Amino acid sequence: MTIPRAAKTQRRTRIQEEKEERILDAALDVFSSSGFRGSTIDQIADAAGMSKPNLLYYFRTKEAIHRALIDRVLFTWLEPLRAFNAEGNPEAEIRSYIRRKLEMARDFPRESRLFANEILQGAPHIEDELKGPLKKLVDEKAEVIRAWARTGKIARCDPYHLIFSIWATTQHYADFDVQVRAVLGQESAGEGRFEDAARFLEQLYMDGLRINKS
Amino acid sequence: MTIPRAAKTQRRTRIQEEKEERILDAALDVFSSSGFRGSTIDQIADAAGMSKPNLLYYFRTKEAIHRALIDRVLFTWLEPLRAFNAEGNPEAEIRSYIRRKLEMARDFPRESRLFANEILQGAPHIEDELKGPLKKLVDEKAEVIRAWARTGKIARCDPYHLIFSIWATTQHYADFDVQVRAVLGQESAGEGRFEDAARFLEQLYMDGLRINKS
DNA sequence: CGATAATTTGACCGATTGGTAAAACATTAC
DNA sequence: GTAATGTTTTACCAATCGGTCAAATTATCG
């Protein structure tokens, strides 16, 4: 007799891992470019190269796929902020935070768009994550920044809005990629825009926060 | 006999204007929070307080509603950038551009999210607008900024990425509102976040672009 | 008023949606 | 091998999708 799919008590099969991996990758494609409501199980099944009932053997509902995907991606996504270090010096920390966030926008645009879609549409599935773990993490880092400002290492500023602005400017290159490319035109076809963006943003924040480069 | 809906040769009825207005407002609600694919005609009809066939009497397809909405909103949305003036002085121009964009994020978040959804999902309906009129407008304003940099009025920087960064940081407060609110917590419940953001961003850009406040 | 045009409704259509049931098929363990 | 388990397929379901149609209703105009 077949045991209910999600309630497997034993370890997972090789096939299970392979298929779940393929499904989640396909789901990332689909959800990140159509949002939750706009995506269909059929699209995901197609993208994963399997039949819909077969897909539903691994994830019982559309919500289940989405939840699994969010869970898997959220941790990685917050890595750069977690790495933000109080002991480091402001210049290096902020510079490398910007750089890492831009690299993620370049290398993992689907993940960025997945979250953007989710939040744009009211974050119905991750509100708790935002108000809990995310808020806690940001509160922590905001305190670090505030300390830097208190000791005159950087200009006085609202640390929350500083973080928001770095999120916004870096993720912009993933989420609004189509617009960025349309405006820059095809002459700048390569990935050079990410280096240009890095140069611009690093300068903006170094001078904007009055960080001495001594 | 009833004349085909879209092909009205004569002026529009009072009822027509009222209803089309109501439909577009309802559609703005729905499209801006679910994207095009994720929205249904029934939702829009419900929100507009009329039956689906009645709605389809005014707009023949879902695409038609969306197109009408985009057309109406796009012009207004680019107003602030259009107002960006070469003759003005950099400090005042950039300050007021930031302020106006933030005001729009506060007062017209649905419009912001409509575009964000559209671009996130690959801009299938407005790609031409982006590559045409928008690019042209940005090219123009980029030239203004470049001139300011050449004459030493502001720091040398990539004008395109400067514009992107202002778009990103200001629209963030509309598009990622849920996240912003979750992170700031409910103690800062009011609209004060927009003033804090304005203060932060004006400082960031004034210092970041080394604009003398003399 | 009556006539004509504009608006609204309810009933309906075929396609697609998320999801199920059961049987066929494949794999593994003994 | 064979039995038990794990996987995949086929056929299907009710609900919802975008959209149509004709008839009923309402507004407008002389």
Image (cartoon, coloured by chain):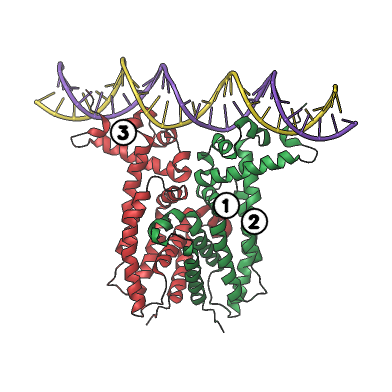
Chain colours: A green, B red, C purple, D yellow
Chain of the residue on which disc 3 is drawn: B
- Residue A53 is situated, as x and y percent measured from the top left of the image, at 63, 30
Image quarter hosting the N terminus of chain B? top left
State whether discs 1 and 3 lie on one chain.
Answer: no
Determine whether label 1 and label 3 are within 8 Å by CB: no
Q: In what element is the residue under mark 2?
A: helix
Residue displayed at 51% across by 62% down = A170
Q: Which residue is mark 3?
A: B58
Give the answer, above or below, for where B60 lies relative to B120. above
User: Which tag is nearer the camera, tag 1 or tag 3?
Assistant: 1
Give the answer, above or below, for where A32 lies relative to A182. above
Inter-mark Cα distance, 2 to 3 = 47 Å
Inter-mark Cα distance, 1 to 3 = 39 Å
Which amino acid type corresponds to the residue marked 1 in the rendered image?
A: Glu
Determine whether label 1 and label 2 are within 8 Å by CB: yes
Whether residue B26 is visible here, answered yes or no, is yes
- Residue B171 is situated, as x and y percent measured from the top left of the image, at 44, 58
Q: Which mark is residue A76?
A: 2
Q: Which residue is mark 1?
A: A111
Image quarter hosting the C terminus of chain B? bottom left
Give the answer, above or below, for where B99 lies relative to B118. below
**Quarter of image, res B94:** bottom left
Whether residue B192 is visible here, answered yes or no, is no
